[in-house]
Image (cartoon, rainbow, N blue to C red):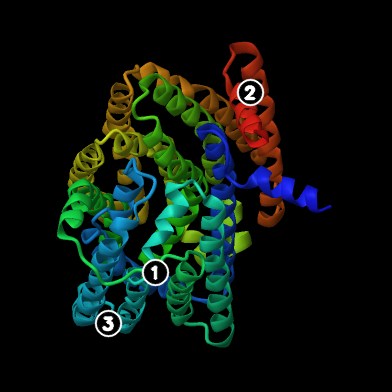
Amino acid sequence: MKDRITKLIQGVVPTGSVLQRTVKSGIWVSATKLSSRLMQILMLIVLARLLAPKDFGIMGIALLTLSGLNRFTEIGLNAALIQQKATNVDDYLDTTWCLEAGRGILIVTGLFVLAPYIASFFDEPTATVPIQVIALSTLFFGFRNPAVVYFKKDLAFHKQFVYETSGGFIQFIVGVSYALVSPTVWALVFASVATSANKFVLSYVMHEYRPWPSFDIEKAKELIHYGKWITGSSIVGFLYSEGDDAFVGWLLTATALGYYQYAYRIADTPSSEVSGVISQITFPAYSRLQDDMDALRSALLETLRFTSFVTFPMAFGIALVAPSFVPAVLGPDWTPMITAMQILALYGLLHSITRNFGAVWKALGRPDYVTKLGMFRVLCIAALIWPATARWGIEGTALVVVGVYVFPMLPIDVYLAAKTVEGRSIQIYREYAYPFVAASVMFATLWYARTLVELSPLVEFLALVPAGAAIYIVTAVVLERQFDWGIERNIRMVVNGIRG
């Protein structure tokens, strides 16, 4: 019995070759993301029944403010440590801790002073205190043990699983428990702060390293030199990923912001989380392959194939089930977000199939691509978002965000990704073509079937999900057999990697 348990543990702990460790890490990261997001989505579904959309809008303002300051002060220390070829980065950790702690103190102080003015900017004075309280999350993050970077650097994602998943449980328990007693925005605020506090404690429990206030200016310069483009991409990333939220909250209302953020979160989470999982795994793996371009190109294409195979049906499925999912699960108060959610499902898809490019660029020492492309996207969105939002509300905002991603960003992203790995754009587009066809067949079939049979929203939702999965899989099998898609080999590779 003991031998079986030992063998089971050895089978899932990331060990072996880079491929085997990457695949096994993928299992843990997938489990981490799935469990964390599942708890978060369950919490949001429960709270959607207890709180008003305006409460989510107020929380949205607080999170936007916190995210903005976090992004504008991000110096890419973790990415710089992961990118280091040396496996041991202990000499950098004290300096990292000092930098992050100072950043946390700066953000908390700034938010406490600026909160009333930020709330006034959004014409929502009740957001002042939530902004000040939620700033504590950054303080906990700043003083956490910097050695948690080893969980990712060493592909030890079984430890990352415990670190992240426990936070999801704490968030769910605190948020739902508080809302049952007092259904106000404070349920969301306290849940967020409790999550950060839990990670702070765990960072010292799970790793024996103990940081000390020792600062090495040369090491700081080295880390910040690499991270300067991470800082730029972080700022630009905030502008194009959350700038639309800020604009909706400013031009429209907190309630409209609640609808838009909820639609975005649900539409983007499933597909983008898959790509997020793969991106977290592949950045360390790509960094190890940076001297072998053929292997790196092959790894990128195989990653895109698997990512697209999973995320295309998820995104198309969200657009399909939104009209039944929202009233059945969230309640009738949330129906104004349905159209925006369907539009943003396409954003989630585009986000997922291009997100992995950033890992390649960072691994090859070109994080500037992320910043420059992000800035160009921001300029395109800025030129269109005001008239579209003023005319069509949150649906107009969603159309601009998706439209700019379709063109010109997608062709540019694909071209630069192919060029970076010394490949051709057509190789990347081919990985998108097959899952697009299979997902389109699934969507069209069920859309037509829904016009023939009238069901209640809940029954319709429960019927569409398994039917969509079955149609997609059957279509994928046909494409594999007829056109040698390659997804079967991809899946076998993943399975073999798990088995070692």
Q: Which residue is mark 1?
A: 210
Q: Which mark is residue 488?
A: 2
Question: What distance separates the C-alpha of mark 2 from that of mark 3?
Answer: 55 Å
**N-terminal of the two: label 2 or label 1?**
1
Question: What distance separates the C-alpha of mark 2 from that of mark 1?
Answer: 46 Å
- Secondary structure found at label 2: helix
Q: Position of residue 123 (x, y in %)?
A: 24, 76
Q: Which residue is mark 3?
A: 125
**N-terminal of the two: label 2 or label 3?**
3
Which callout, 2 or 3, points to the residue nearer the camera?
A: 2
Q: Is residue 389 left or right of residue 395?
A: left
Identity of the amino acid at label 1? Arg
Q: Are marks 2 and 3 in contact (CB under 8 Å)?
A: no
Of all residues shown, which one is farthest toward the bottom?
181
Please give the name of the residue rendered at 23% of the width and 41% of the height, measured from the top-left corner: 377
- Of residues 3 and 276, the one drawn nearer to the viewer in this rendering: 3
Identity of the amino acid at label 2? Glu
**N-terminal of the two: label 3 or label 1?**
3
**Callout 1 crowding tier (Cα within 10 Å): few <14, some 14–19, many ≥20:** few
Which callout, 3 or 1, points to the residue nearer the camera?
A: 1
Please give the name of the residue rendered at 46% of the width and 70% of the height, measured from the top-left corner: 204
Q: Which mark is residue 286?
A: none
Q: Position of residue 198 (x, y in %)?
A: 49, 73
Q: Quadrant of residue 178?
A: bottom right
- Secondary structure found at label 1: loop
Q: Is residue 144 left or right of residue 218?
A: right
Q: Quadrant of residue 46?
A: bottom right
- The answer to whether any part of residue 128 appears in the image is yes
- Of residues 190 and 8, the one drawn nearer to the viewer in this rendering: 8
Identity of the amino acid at label 3? Pro
- Of residues 48 and 431, the one drawn nearer to the viewer in this rendering: 431
